[in-house]
Amino acid sequence: MLPENTGARQRLALARLTTGLAILNTLWHLPPGDALVDEWSRKEDGEGPRSGRLSAEQYEALRRLAFVSTAAWTLGAESKALKFAANASFAAVQRHVAQFDDRAWNYNSNLNVYLLLLSLTDSRGSLAEAAGDGTEDDTPSSEVATAVLLAMRLYYGCLYFQSGLSKVLLSGPAWADGRTLRGSWAELGNRAGKWLSRRPMTVAAAASAATLAFELLFPAAQIALRKRPRAVGLSSLAFHASIKATMGISFWHHAVHALPLFVLDPGAERHTARLLRAFRKR
């Protein structure tokens, strides 16, 4: 049986706001084009630039286009051209920055996936009703909204499953013996993490086994707890809070989506819509 998807249209509108703000925050904090070009020049050391690499000017132009188009979409603008511009420009910026370190090419590509899924239909929720410009073709039916929400939730869970599966494939079940996590606490941990690294190995082993079980079983938990999506989302937030508390790593761009997809009441969407309308009138 599939997870319940009550209030799908409202959850999509909340996810739209969350995704938009996450993308804008990402774009705002990206390094300037000149800094990337200088760094790449030092790394390549005469080998010549990679084919298809953007110039500093092209990168900055795409970054501005992505920021403006995503901001307009987040505030409720809805057109196929605008959504194409937001998706294409943000993807191009992400691709360019990812070339800085090939190992991290998919670090926050979840934002590209969520933006694309939300662009498949009108995800404005109450904003569309207030604008009065939704057409029968654009306004999502309950079936369409449910399908998009289900896809976003399954993708959210698959990110955990992928992480757990990679641990098993690369290290095998031995990853759960605690040595890897204990070493991470010692090397990367903050005060709490370093303290944990000095505890008996059984502490790290228990935390490692719990991590592996959480990641591999998260998609199944969505189905088992299909009537309690808030419990699913809160478990995700607690998982990331523990990582932040011990190693200072938040994965905020992933964890924040637990709020609209699972935790928040769909009724909160109308309150956010009122705030957006007030902001747009300024």
Image (tube, helix red, strand yellow):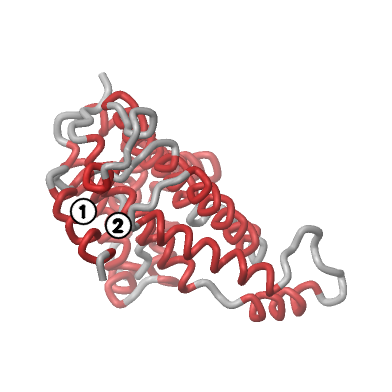
Q: Which mark is residue 273?
A: 1
Count neighbours of disc 2 (C-alpha within 10 A) and say few if under 14, some if 14 to 19, many if 20 or more.
some
Q: CA distance from mark 1 to mark 2?
A: 28 Å
- Camera-side residue of 271 and 5: 271
Q: Which amino acid does the dot numbered 2 rest on?
A: His
Q: Position of residue 179 (x, y in %)?
A: 42, 57
Please report the residue visible at 31 percent of the width from the left and 51 percent of the height from the top: 257
User: Can you identify the residue that label 2 sits on?
Assistant: 240
Location of the N terminus (image quadrant): top left
Q: Is residue 205 above or below residue 216?
A: below
For this view, does 52 lie left or right of residue 259?
right
- Judging depth in this view, the residue of 169 and 53 nearest the camera is 53
Nearer to us: label 1 or label 2: 1
In the displayed image of the protein, which residue is found farthest to the front? 132
Give SS at disc 1: helix
Q: Position of residue 84 (x, y in %)?
A: 54, 47
Q: Position of residue 130 (x, y in %)?
A: 22, 47
Residue sitting at x 64%, y 80%: 35
Q: Where 85 sits versus 27, above or below?
A: above
The kind of residue on which mark 1 rests is Ala
Give the percent coordinates (x, y) of residue 152.
37, 38
Label 1 close to label 2 by CB (< 8 Å):
no
